Amino acid sequence: MPDGKASAKASATWRVDTTRRPRGHRARSKGSALAARAALVAALAVSLLAAAAANAPAVIVHLENGKTLSYMPLAGAPAVVPLDEFFSNVDYNGGLVMASNTNYAFYWDPSGAPAYPSDYRPGLNRYFKDLAHDSGGHENVDSVSSQYNDAAGEFALYESHFAGAIVDTNPYPANGCKRAKICLTDAQLQAELSKYVAAHSLPRDLAHEYFLLTPPGVEDCFEANGFECSAGSSRPVYCAYHGNIPVGEGGEIIYANDPFVTGIEGCDDGNHPNGTSSDAALQGGLSHEHNESITDPEPNNAWTDIGGSGGEIGDKCRTFEASTEFGAPLGKAKNGAKYNQVVNGHFYWYQQEWSNQRHKCMQRLTFTGAEPTATFSSTTDAGNKMSFDATGSTAPGGVARYNWQFNDGPGLNFPTETKTPTVSHTFPAAGPYLVALTVFAANGTSIGTAQTVAVGKAPAPTVTRVSPKKGPAEGATGVTVTGTGFGPGTSATSFKFGSTPASEVNCASATTCTLVDPAHKAGTVDVKATVGGQSSRKNAPADQFTYQ
């Protein structure tokens, strides 16, 4: 909609400030001391689990509906850093990063809603434009994110673009939570964003992100129970958060929720180098969530610490200590406020991001060395035990350590850290598993890779539920399949509707997969899963789908 007019498909206003698109973007559905440290981790695993729950913010949370979110905690909550003393750098967990990011500022502003301050939206729009203007440089924290890669060979490059400002005038739904006069749940925010994006045929992929920015007085909670809510609510826990929304056509919506935090202690320290209300939004979560989205767009799948169950690169720098969270100020603006970022000549103040290269939080990437290489092979031992060999991996000056991540159990999966390139692991049962490897150079430079391995001879998968049960003959319906024996990821499991393959398969676990059904003539068909050459048996009517 380059003319900036509203789509006829929705009763909302669409405004575009600029329509730049990313260049070549792609759409994609996902020694002794060391030994002593590893032993300490194993010995303290149980107590650390308890400590994590009791003493540190669960910055990555798993909701009752299966959704995973990552949030920026309100100041005053225990910092993430103390738990990180055992895990100095973030590790790769096998997921995807955003190779480029085109950003939308999404203002939900229906008639009669509380008003944004007059300088709020212009200030944020200018920031997104500034970020795009300096894209590819080393002037701000986005450059820190560019050191992190994924198994597909992509890096989270500082390739940032501003697609424009969206003003959504659709009314707010009835309150889904009770912690504020206007209180919306994450599910309600997801629903509105998904509806708007679909109605206006906006991108749904790993190259675009939507920043949902609500006005003062509009609060939100993760769930209806209201246990964890935004900073301005009666149950303040977070300043902002990010997540992803899988969509039926095989894509996904990457989004960040940034409720209004200006003047709220714990999110806004009052240091505003531009003298605008929008300054608070940047230090209160927007930059934090932006960089975490780039390096871990599907929360808990790419670059995180503590084996994929702790914090992301922003969380490690959410220390509540100015010297580590923001770093040394670069100077003062005309109004006397400090700044630590200069973006397109404008001054800003927001948190640093974690750098594996320097083992610390940084304002900008000041060192770029040759990247290591990471590769490994697997050999089946007795039973469910496998050996892994990363001898082919290299790093400038030699590999300092290898961190292995075996995604084979619930809760915290602590990485296996070794100085030698070989390691053995016993899996809980036969089946396909995702194994990720992070290789570190002596200077901290890191790189990750991952692959799915087949352990033993697993029983054939089963299909016990298909939802929804019906769809149009032209296909393209998003379907969730429940069962057993599925291979996690996007390639270990395939599905057929009758004799026709489904597309965009993504299995979040051994029991749940999402996919897009193929076109088929009207009638009822069996949905069959295949893993490692073994296919599920018929299980009518639980495994059936009806085309209409």
Image (cartoon, rainbow, N blue to C red):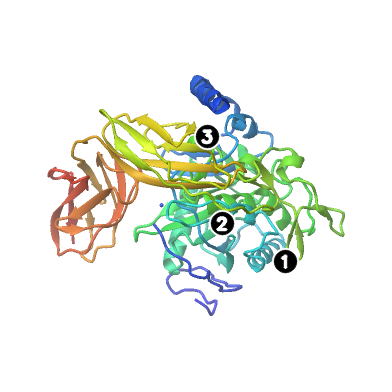
Task: Tell me the residue at 51%/55% (across/down).
Answer: 255
Query: Crowding at label 1, few (<14), some or many (≥20) Cα neighbours within 10 Å?
Result: some
**Element at badge 2?**
strand
What's the residue type where badge 1 is placed?
Asn
Q: Give the side of residue 379 with respect to residue 230, left or right.
A: left
- Marker count (numbered): 3
Q: Amino acid at mark 3?
A: Ile
Q: Mark 1 sits on what residue?
A: 344
**Residue 504: image location, x then y, percent:** 32, 57
First in sequence: mark 2 vs mark 3: 2
Instruction: Indicate which disc, 3 or 1, sits on the residue closer to the N terminus.
Output: 3
Q: Is residue 469 visible?
A: no
Front residue (pair 136, 318): 136
Distance of mark 2 from mark 1, alpha carbons?
24 Å
The residue beneath circle 2 is 212
Counting from the top left corner in percent of width and height, residue 373 is at 48, 49
Can the viewer see residue 466? yes
Q: Which mark is residue 301?
A: none
Up the image or down, 150 lies above or below 195; here it is above
- Identify residue for label 3: 306
